[in-house]
Amino acid sequence: MKQILGIGSRINHPKHGKGVVTNVTAKMYWVTFIENGLETIATDDDFEIIEAAEDEVDTVSFYEVEKSLRDILKKWNGFSEIVPIADKWKGGSMILKPADSNLSSKEIPIDTFFHKIVMLRDRLRVMEQKINASKELSEQDKIDLQQYITRCYGSLTTFNVLFKNNSQQFRGESVTK
């Protein structure tokens, strides 16, 4: 197992270049790269350690504590996290153009569309929680319904390009390495 780097560690990543670790969780590093900005990478990703800062973080980071608190508030208070749209899409629009040139096009602000995608994702998460907490459903029914929800997430991965933060994107079924 690789050593866990502390905040302030400098690395050289084959895809993103040189950067500095700005946050750490048990599985992820938030790294600010010189040329690519903020990216999240797995702690077991391949990269060169230029300078390792001592790991002064517990296995639970401030981010994970904040995320847990947000999840609790969301569950009991209807609180919804703020999900930023990727900078390149801010203020943009989406044009739906029918094949029939006699019909008019429809232009939708991309921020509005993105907000609806995020609401859909949040509602799928609530449905997931309700299924998992249900006392009426059998374990097999829960597994079957969970698989449908996972496939829904997978169908929505096309819209991941709109999310600013990779950690907030849709995740469907994936094949393990």
Image: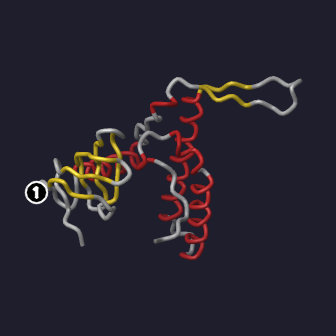
Give 39 or 50, whichever is nearer the viewer.
Answer: 50
x, y percentage for residue 19?
26, 45
Give 137 or 27, whichever is nearer the viewer.
Answer: 27
x, y percentage for residue 84?
43, 35
The amino acid type, in three-letter code, at marker 1 is Glu
- Compared across the picture, whether 58 is left or right of 72 comes to left
- Compared across the picture, whether 109 is left or right of 167 comes to right
Q: Residues within 10 Å of mark 1 (few under 14, many from 20)?
A: few
The picture quadrant where one finds residue 97 is top right
SS state under label 1? loop
The structure residue drawn at horizontal position 39% and vertical position 43%, both measured from the top left corner, is 77
| Residue 174 against residue 89 in the figure, above or below | below
x, y percentage for residue 140?
58, 76
The structure residue drawn at horizontal position 43% and vertical position 42%, both measured from the top left corner, is 78
The structure residue drawn at horizontal position 38% and vertical position 51%, both measured from the top left corner, is 15
The structure residue drawn at horizontal position 53% and vertical position 42%, both measured from the top left corner, is 161
x, y percentage for residue 3?
19, 66
The picture quadrant where one finds residue 152 is bottom right
Where the N terminus falls, by quadrant?
A: bottom left
- Compared across the picture, whether 15 is left or right of 115 comes to left
The picture quadrant where one finds residue 54 is bottom left
Residue receiving disc 1: 54
- Compared across the picture, whether 101 is left or right of 24 comes to right
| Residue 146 against residue 156 in the figure, above or below | below
